[in-house]
Image (cartoon, grey):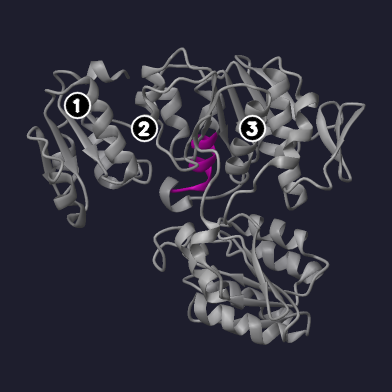
């Protein structure tokens, strides 16, 4: 839906974070005389009113009755359309869209490369933009990685690399604009509290492929859900198999062609090297020689909070993997440090994910010790007690992150890796994974401000 089509309709905004503010500015830039209503948190009312927008009505209470008054509600990504009040309003005819829908509808001629996946989407997006820029292409890096698309409504770039969360993928289809390329790294359960079920999460995530119908789909051949897809409207390119870009040890291959030794690329873990395969597949699909650009991966700056070495102190190396919000991600982190003495910090907000596979994996590849914490910490702890009783690992419980770091230090006795890879979101204890990662750095004795910048966002 184009912004111009909002004229003479009853329109509301829902959410006043960075995405909500970007949507307000974009709508105002096109429709300065359109009356708007904003639903936001009580703590945000004063900030919204400080805009001085005489045509913006700000309300702190939202329910189905109020939402159903409006023809269109532009909501922030973190607000689930499956909330009861949203479902009830939608049944009465209210249309819910996101800023992603508006941007795609406003920029139908932009050459877009959309990247999603349960894990790896941020690294894949940033690496894709890095290599395209290395090839001399003016490229935007935006979206879920840390910048609302609508903040770049007037920007110009040859390629637009857009990271999308599962909260945003369906918004692309609602724009009625087909992405040029869609890259999907993997699919496994996540964000069940927002989507309501695993089936709905998968459906929403895959809507970037099944409903948005990209011209080119770049897919992981090792993901069973992706491998089972039938996408007749897209030209499908696979990575991770022997006919496409894949790894043999540390060496990167394109089919039978040996291309590049990745041993010195700053991408910790085999799963991150797999993201490089996705990137190179997408670049080849654009008609650009990816093999010529592959060596530039050696100059990529890793993103913060993703297996990020914070520093070493008193014989202990501190690794910040605060972005880890699923057990699968935690297992991938453990693979990277499998040859070290590791104290693993796990637990956080309980989304209802099943940790039994994680516990089963600990029977064969347990770290030196595990410290559980957070809302789901007791549930994880209970699954690991049999291994601790058998002497396979040292198991501790912590009240919070500060306590967990202290117990990890005691557990390792001056030698090893303190690995924060929680496998769960930070909600409740922290605003987001960034705040959790910063606190971890401070607890380890390092400057939290030195670990947070995401390089490359914007147009360059």
Report the Cα–Cα distance between label 3 and label 1: 38 Å
Please state if 379 lies on the left or on the right of 408 as rendered.
left
Report the Cα–Cα distance between label 3 and label 2: 21 Å
For label 1, the SS is loop
Confirm whether residue 228 shows in the render.
Answer: no
Look at mark 2 in the image and give the residue it sits on: 151
**Residue density around tag 3, few if under 14, some if 14–19, many if 20 or more, within 10 Å:** many
Does the magenta portion include 204? Answer: yes
**Residue density around tag 2, few if under 14, some if 14–19, many if 20 or more, within 10 Å:** many
Look at mark 1 in the image and give the residue it sits on: 71
Q: Residue at x 55, y 32 (%)?
A: 206
Q: Residue at x 54, y 50 (%)?
A: 190
419 above or below 270? below
Return the residue found at the far left.
54
Which numbered circle lies on residue 186?
none
Look at mark 3 in the image and give the residue it sits on: 128
Report the Cα–Cα distance between label 2 and label 1: 24 Å
């Amino acid at each position: 839906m184009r912004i111009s089509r909002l004229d003479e309709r009853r329109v509301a905004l829902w959410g006043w974070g960075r995405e909500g503010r970007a949507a307000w500015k974009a709508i105002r830039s096109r429709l300065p005389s359109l009356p708007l209503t904003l639903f936001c948190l009580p703590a945000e009312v004063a900030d919204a009113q400080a805009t001085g927008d005489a045509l913006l009505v700000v309300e702190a209470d939202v329910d189905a009755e109020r939402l159903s008054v409006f023809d269109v509600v532009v909501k922030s990504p973190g607000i689930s359309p499956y909330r009861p009040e949203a479902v009830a309003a939608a049944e009465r005819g209210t249309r819910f869209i996101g800023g992603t829908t508006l941007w795609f509808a406003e920029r139908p001629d932009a050459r877009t490369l959309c990247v999603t996946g349960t894990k790896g989407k941020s690294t894949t997006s940033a690496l894709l933009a890095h290599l395209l820029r290395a090839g001399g292409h003016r490229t935007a890096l935006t979206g879920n990685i840390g910048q609302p698309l609508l903040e770049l409504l007037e920007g110009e770039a040859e390629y637009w690399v857009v990271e999308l969360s599962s909260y945003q993928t369906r918004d692309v289809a609602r724009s009625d604009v087909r992405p040029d390329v869609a890259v999907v790294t993997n699919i496994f359960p996540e964000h069940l509290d927002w989507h309501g079920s695993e089936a709905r999460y998968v459906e929403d995530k895959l809507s970037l492929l099944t409903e948005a119908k990209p011209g080119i789909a770049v897919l992981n051949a090792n993901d069973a859900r992706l491998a089972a897809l039938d996408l007749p409207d897209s030209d499908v390119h696979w990575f991770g198999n022997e006919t496409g870009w894949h790894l043999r040890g540390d060496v990167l291959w394109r089919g039978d062609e040996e291309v590049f030794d990745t041993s010195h690329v700053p991408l910790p873990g085999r799963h991150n090297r797999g993201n490089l395969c996705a990137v190179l597949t997408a670049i080849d699909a654009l008609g650009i020689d990816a093999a010529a650009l592959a060596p530039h991966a050696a100059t990529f700056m890793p993103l913060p909070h993703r297996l990020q070495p914070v520093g070493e102190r008193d014989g202990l190396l501190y690794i910040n993997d605060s972005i880890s919000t699923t057990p699968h991600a935690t297992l991938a982190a453990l693979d990277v440090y499998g040859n070290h003495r590791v104290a693993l910090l796990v637990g956080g907000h309980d989304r209802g994910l099943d940790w039994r596979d994680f516990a089963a994996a600990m029977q064969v590849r347990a770290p030196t010790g595990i410290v559980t914490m957070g809302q789901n910490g007791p549930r994880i702890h209970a699954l690991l007690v049999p291994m601790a009783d058998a002497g396979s690992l040292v198991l501790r419980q912590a009240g919070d992150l500060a306590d967990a770091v202290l117990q990890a230090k005691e557990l390792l006795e001056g030698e090893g890796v303190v690995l924060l890879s929680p496998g769960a979101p930070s909600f409740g204890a922290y605003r987001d994974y960034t705040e959790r990662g910063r606190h971890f750095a401070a607890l380890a004795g390092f400057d939290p401000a030195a670990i947070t910048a995401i390089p490359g966002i914007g147009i360059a």
